[in-house]
Amino acid sequence: MILILLYHKLMKYPSSDLWWKTFDLQLSILKKTYRVLSLEEALEYLHRGVMPDRKCVVITFDDGYADNYVYAYPLLKKHGLRATLFVATSRIQPTESKRKTLLDYWEGRVSFRELFSGDNMFMANKKFVEDGQKEQFLTVGELRAMRDVFEFGWHSVSHVKTFSEERLLGFFTGKGHWSLALSYGEKPRKGFPLFPLSSNLVTREGRLKREVKEMIKSLPEKFFQRRDWESLLRRELYSHFSSLIEWEEEESFERRKVHEVEKAIEDLSGWLDTVISVGAYPFGEYNQQLVALCKKYLKAALTTEKAYVKEDTDMYRIPRVTVPRDMWSFMGILIKFLRAP
């Protein structure tokens, strides 16, 4: 049986995402407790329909944050472990520049204060979607520098969510998913409607209609000071519009899906001079159509479903367990795996 762990970001200081020192400790525990496989090794077992004679662990990262190079890369190298990084290619900076890493700090070439200190995962993606800022993500040069430790895989080009059905959940008041700017066509503002969100690879993209936005923008500030403004706005919108969302055409959706797979694989292959043969579904979301598409380009695809890899696991529905930021929850994952029959 194999446990595949999913990481995203490592933080310079303790915060809402995983601290690099906690990751260092986790690697020590994993190395002492389990056999740590590369993803390629794990897939070879699965392809043969057999499992290792002892429980094993695989380490994966999603998206492509700068801290994966600055902190995760030297820590994995220190422990002699390999990992796989699934890259959302739109985030990658097209430059050969490389930031200083923990290795530079350990060897006295920079102070700890000089090392990259990134935003949390939410803010890094929000800044990218709303303003196109890529500073929180890896460069091509950094990707290339990590090839001795990391394998790389497909994770789409855009990696965003979109409105997936016209079921009004409420209105934006300052909190919401970092993908909202895509569905609004601009930065979110108070009063914009909220609808269910899904990966834009499993549903047509839904955009809030321009005339709906204009109507909401025309409302005076005092309207939003009323205690019942949300119920009033709901009635107003549906008295003026039969539908609030403009939906992507099905033909356009099908073309875009192919582009999201082909373009990301093409870019990664070009940057890294290697064959890209594995992938991870954005947000772990997939359907039969996306699985069928991935089968044309990849030999395996990973989800975020919480389960273990066994002999009969589907190569295109491989489960992973997301690692939380606290050690107690991490230890709970390992203990549960140890006790699993």
Image: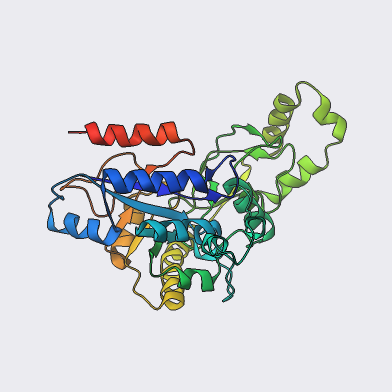
Residue at screen point 32% across, 56% down: 301
Question: Residue 285: in sight, yes or no?
Answer: no
Nearer to us in this view, 268 or 33:
33
- Colour convention: rainbow
- Side (left or right) of 209 relative to 138: right
The spot of residue 265 in percent (x, y) is 41, 70
Return the residue nearer the eye: 81 or 161: 81
Image height check: is 40 above or below 236?
below
Where residue 329 sits, quadrant-wise, is top left
Residue 72 located left or right of residue 341: right
Q: Up-down: is 95 above or below 65? A: below
The location of residue 84, given as percent across then percent down, is 37, 59
**Is residue 99 visible from the viewing direction of this image?**
yes
Q: Is residue 319 left or right of residue 46?
A: right
- Compare residues 65 and 298 and report the one nearer the observer: 65
**Residue at the top extreme?**
227
Which is more toward the observer, 168 or 10? 10
Quarter of the figure that contains the N terminus? top left
Residue 137 position in % (x across, y down): 57, 61
In this rendering, the count of numbered labels is 0
Task: Identify the residue at horizontal 66%, vertical 37% (top origin).
Answer: 175
Relative image position of residue 207 (x, y in whole percent): 61, 50
Residue drawn at 63 percent across, 54 percent down: 117
The image quarter in which residue 308 lies = top left
* Rendered-image quadrant of the C terminus: top left
x 44%, y 78%: residue: 270
